[in-house]
Every structure is written in structure tokens, then in C-alpha cells.
Amino acid sequence: QVQLVESGGGLVQTGGSLRLSCAASGRIVSINVMGWYRQAPGKPRELVATITNGRENYADSVKGRFTISRDNAKNTVYLQMNSLKPEDTAVYYCNVEYLYYTGIRISRWGQGTQVTVSS
């Protein structure tokens, strides 16, 4: 069984910063893509950022403010969020695509962490 544990959410004022982390553990052979998504109330889940083979991809709404990174030795992905805005308020989910020890490629979601930006 593979587990994803997210941390780092919270309440912050406009212009503030937060750092999210998501650690994957279990019988993982290799990880392909790690990413962050978010879902605000009444809206569909949307991509925030992904990182694979060192290549980063960002939603236009967060470019220049958010930075995604990963520590391959720890199977952990981070999301540094700066200059936060009220519209960034959402539940943030990490997603990891990995090769399980059985040879099956799996995509798994974290449990979600709430980020609230007050105006």
C-alpha cells in the first residue's frame, strides 16, 4: 500500500506565504509525475503545478508566485506559495503517478489540505 501525507496548509493573509509538502511512502519503484491541484467550493478541481523529470508546469494563475519542487530521495513534492491572494483559497491535493512494485503504474491523490487566504 502507498500512502501520501500532505501538510502545510493553513490560514494566511493576502500577500503571505505557505509551503505545502506531500510525502509518498510504500512499495514504490519509481515516481513519474508529482503535482498539485486545488478545488475551491463549487468549482471543479484544477491543476496548479506539476513536475516531472525536472520539468515544471504551472497554471497561468500561479505563474511567478508558486514554485513546485521535489526531493527524489524522500519521494516528497513541495509547493512554495508566495504573494497569496484570496482567490487561491481552496483545498489543495497532491497527486503522484508512480510505478508500484507489482509493475502497475498508479495515480494516487493525497487527502487534501485547506489553504485559506484572508483579504
Image (cartoon, rainbow, N blue to C red):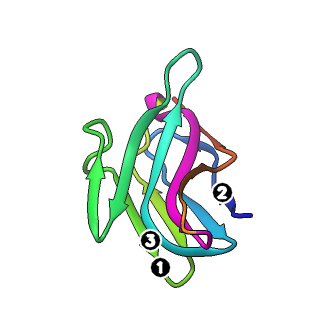
Q: Position of residue 45 (x, y in %)?
A: 49, 29
Q: Amino acid at mark 3?
A: Arg
In the rendered image, which residue does mark 2 sit on?
6
Marks 2 and 1 sit apart, C-alpha to C-alpha, by 16 Å
Which label was assigned to residue 72?
Answer: 1
Name the residue located 52 percent from the left edge and 85 percent from the top edge. Answer: 73
User: In the rendering, which numbered label is found on residue 70?
Assistant: 3
Report the disc number at residue 48: none
Task: Verify CB contact (< 8 Å) between mark 2 and mark 1.
Answer: no
Residue at 40% in and 39% down: 47
Q: Give the Cα distance between marks 3 and 2.
A: 13 Å
- The residue nearer to you, when weighing 114 against 112, is 112
Question: In this picture, is 110 found above or below 39?
Answer: below
- 65 vs 105, nearest the viewer: 105
Q: Can you say whether 59 is above or below 5 in the image?
A: above
In the image, 79: left or right of 6?
Answer: left
Q: Amino acid at mark 2?
A: Glu
Q: Residue furthest top?
A: 42
**How packed is label 3: few (under 14 Cα within 10 Å), some, or many (20 or more)?**
some
In reply to whether residue 72 is colored magenta, the answer given is: no
Residue 89 shown in magenta: yes
Asked if marks 3 and 1 touch (Cβ < 8 Å), the reply is yes
Predominant SS of the magenta segment:
strand
Question: Which image quadrant: the N terminus?
Answer: bottom right
Question: What is the span of residues highlighted in magenta in the rendered image?
Answer: 87-102
Depicted 75 relative to depicted 39: above or below: below
Helix, strand, or loop for circle 1? Answer: loop
- Answer whether residue 117 is visible to the viewer in this image: no
